[in-house]
Each structure stands twice: as structure tokens, then as C-alpha cells.
Image (cartoon, rainbow, N blue to C red):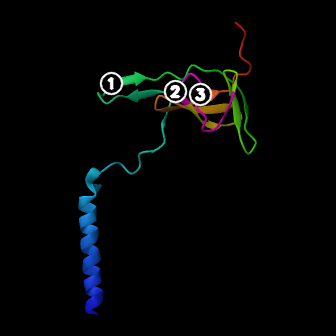
């Protein structure tokens, strides 16, 4: 009986110390999403609202109902996780009519528009 009490007191002390020592007092909102934000207005750290601009690409097509979905973006074929050429963006998800691109810290939903028009 004495051993059980000692173990319980020890575990309570370790829990209390680890809670205080590991920086749990951060008090972040547990309901905040960990996913990147979708496109639109955002609030900067200074409190001002800034409008984000989507990546300057044209999504020409998407093949989504396969084991390896692919999208044609600016004439190049990409899979999920690929980095876009000449642009600091990454293919995040491919659907039937949409391709999600992670660009400048935000997630953008780009519509499949069809073939790129000749200039």
C-alpha cells in the first residue's frame, strides 16, 4: 500500500514538473488550424490587413482519379508534393476541377482552366 502511494506521489510530481518546465504555459488556442490558410485577406503581425495574390500559373488540366494524381501547370506535369519550376510553390492536392498550391505560406485553390491560350 505504501509503495502505491509513493508511486502515485512520484508520478504526480513528475507530471507537475514536466508541465511547468516544458513550456506548456504557451496557452495557444487548441482549435486553431495547423493547415496553411486558404487565399484571401490575412492580418499581418502589425495588425494591418493585406490581400494575398495567387501564384502566377495556369492550371491546364488534372488527372485525379488514379493512384498518382497529376496536374498540367504551365505546360509541365506535376504530382502532389512537387515544387513548381521558376516559382516557390508546391502542389498540395489535386482534384477533378481544382489544384491546391501552397505558395508564399498560403494554400491557394486554382481552377482547371483548360489549354493555355497562344499569345
Q: Which residue is drawn at 56% across and 32% down?
A: 90
Task: Give me the disc on residue 48.
Answer: 1
Q: What stretch is highlighted in magenta?
A: 77-89
Task: State how many labels appear.
Answer: 3
Q: Position of residue 21 (x, y in %)?
A: 24, 59
Callout 1 crowding tier (Cα within 10 Å): few <14, some 14–19, many ≥20: few
Q: Which residue is identified by label 2?
A: 88
Please tell me whether mark 2 or mark 1 is closer to you in this view: 2
User: In this view, which residue lies farthest toward the top?
Assistant: 119
- Report the side of 46 relative to 101 (left or right): left
Q: Where is residue 13 in the image (x, y as percent from the top left)?
A: 24, 73
Measured in 3D between alpha carbons, the distance from the residue under mark 2 to the one under mark 1, in whole angstroms, is 25 Å
Please tell me whether mark 1 or mark 3 is closer to you in this view: 3
Helix, strand or loop under label 1? loop
Measured in 3D between alpha carbons, the distance from the residue under mark 3 to the one under mark 2, in whole angstroms, is 7 Å
Question: Which of the two discs, 2 and 1, labels the residue nearer the N terminus?
Answer: 1
Helix, strand or loop under label 2? loop
Asked if residue 114 is positioned above or below residue 30 in the image, the reply reads above
- Which quadrant of the figure has residue 119? top right
Task: Give me the disc on residue 102.
Answer: none
Asked if residue 101 is positioned above or below residue 57 in the image, the reply reads below
Helix, strand or loop under label 3? loop
Q: Where is residue 107 in the image (x, y as percent from the top left)?
A: 52, 33
Amino acid at each position: 500500500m505504501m509503495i502505491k502511494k509513493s508511486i502515485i506521489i512520484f508520478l504526480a510530481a513528475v507530471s507537475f514538473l514536466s508541465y511547468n518546465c516544458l513550456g506548456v504555459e504557451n496557452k495557444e488556442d487548441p482549435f486553431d488550424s495547423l493547415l496553411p490558410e486558404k487565399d484571401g485577406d490575412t492580418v499581418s503581425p502589425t495588425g494591418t490587413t493585406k490581400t494575398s495574390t495567387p501564384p502566377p500559373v495556369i492550371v491546364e488540366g488534372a488527372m485525379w482519379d488514379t493512384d498518382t494524381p497529376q496536374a498540367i501547370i504551365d505546360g509541365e506535369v506535376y504530382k502532389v508534393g512537387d515544387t513548381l519550376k521558376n516559382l516557390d510553390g508546391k502542389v498540395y492536392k489535386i482534384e477533378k476541377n481544382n489544384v491546391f498550391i501552397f505558395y508564399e505560406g498560403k494554400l491557394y485553390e486554382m481552377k482547371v482552366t483548360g489549354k493555355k491560350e497562344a499569345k
